[in-house]
Amino acid sequence: MKKSTLPRRNFLKKSGNAVAAISLTSTPLAACATTNKLAPLPLANKDWTIQQVMDLMIDKIPGGKKEQTVDTIKIGDASQKVTGIVSTFMATVEVIEQAAWLGANFIITHEPTFYNHLDETDWLATDPVYQHKKALLEKHGMVVWRFHDYWHTYRPDGILHGFLNEVGWQEYLDNSRENVCVIPSIKLKDLAAFLKKQFNLTRTFYIGDPEMICENVGILPGAWGGRTHIPFLGKENIEVLIIGESAEWETVEYVRDAAHAGMKKGLIIMGHARSEEPGMRWLVEWLKPMVEGVKITYIGAGDPLKPV
Ligand SMILES: [Zn+2]
């Protein structure tokens, strides 16, 4: 499968004030960095603004700035000086509190802050949970920026790269098939147990014959949806697909039918958060050399679902 054929779940059209604000507040220095690819300018002190950090990161992404993306500023004033950066999968209330305690004013989050893909807030205006979270962010002068589309566009895909680091599978990556590893033979039930241990998962599910031998493994951390999972399982000749989450009536039922029909297909469900968190932890390593002198911390939000 060519890279261009794997649809990206969250690359939806979105334009708005936050996107416009990026270009309005772009600095001459950031513009310089964009045109001078061979000599990126390191951030050498804490006088940099949050916008300048954002511009520096975007400059590293193939294709540069996106006009249509969910990766917008969700709240806050990016023209302020950065006091510290937090990278996380999810800017939960707890993560925001911890970021404030660390003295950071810039949270980079992979997923939405306000409980919907586009972070639309009109429908939440009178909701007490939304109000609490918004007030907390405002109290601490926090800027929240989503870094989803950009991180998946980076090569290697930042989330996949972090995942492979976590399982030690970098050497198994199949360069001819995107998001596929060819691993030493392992039974489906053992692969699920391995992932549970490696990622310290509190809940792990699988579908398919537990004794099925797996070698060609598809990896789609996060929630790509059945329309991506199902063709991927079919076209890539893979035995098992590892995902973050799926609607239970989509990919889950497809794999149940495939397995019952005798086809060698399996599915392992890790939970959305834990499947993508290593990618946001790797972001800290990636960003650190670019923003010398600025404290960057990874905060794991963890899996919100607790097994009984
Ligand atoms: Zn993702």
Image: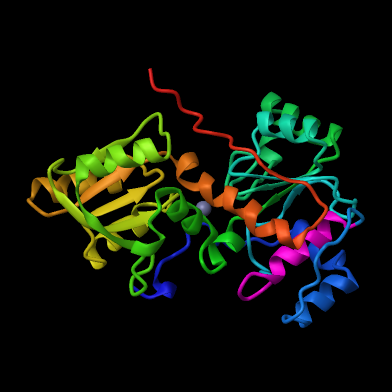
Over which residues does the magenta segment extend? 48-64
Residue farthest to the left, as pictured: 262
Quarter in which the C terminus is drawn: top left
Magenta stretch encompasses residue 299: no
Magenta stretch encompasses residue 53: yes
Provide residue 116's location: percent of width, then percent of height. 58, 43
269 with respect to 4 (left or right): left
Quarter in which the N terminus is drawn: bottom left
Provide residue 128's location: percent of width, then percent of height. 70, 24
198 with respect to 121 (left or right): left
Provide residue 100's location: percent of width, then percent of height. 79, 33
In this rendering, does residue 125 appear at all? no
Residue found 61% across the figure and 63% down from its top: 150
243 with respect to 103 (left or right): left
Vertical order, 80 against 56 (above or below)? above
Vertical order, 209 against 92 (above or below)? below
Q: Quadrant of residue 285?
A: bottom right
Q: Quadrant of residue 69?
A: bottom right
- Judging depth in this view, the residue of 84 and 89 nearest the camera is 84
- Judging depth in this view, the residue of 194 and 54 nearest the camera is 194
In this rendering, does residue 246 appear at all? yes
Provide residue 201's location: percent of width, then percent of height. 41, 33
Residue found 77% across the figure and 79% down from its top: 39
- Judging depth in this view, the residue of 255 and 306 nearest the camera is 306
Q: Quadrant of residue 298?
A: top right
Residue found 81% across the figure and 42% down from its top: 105
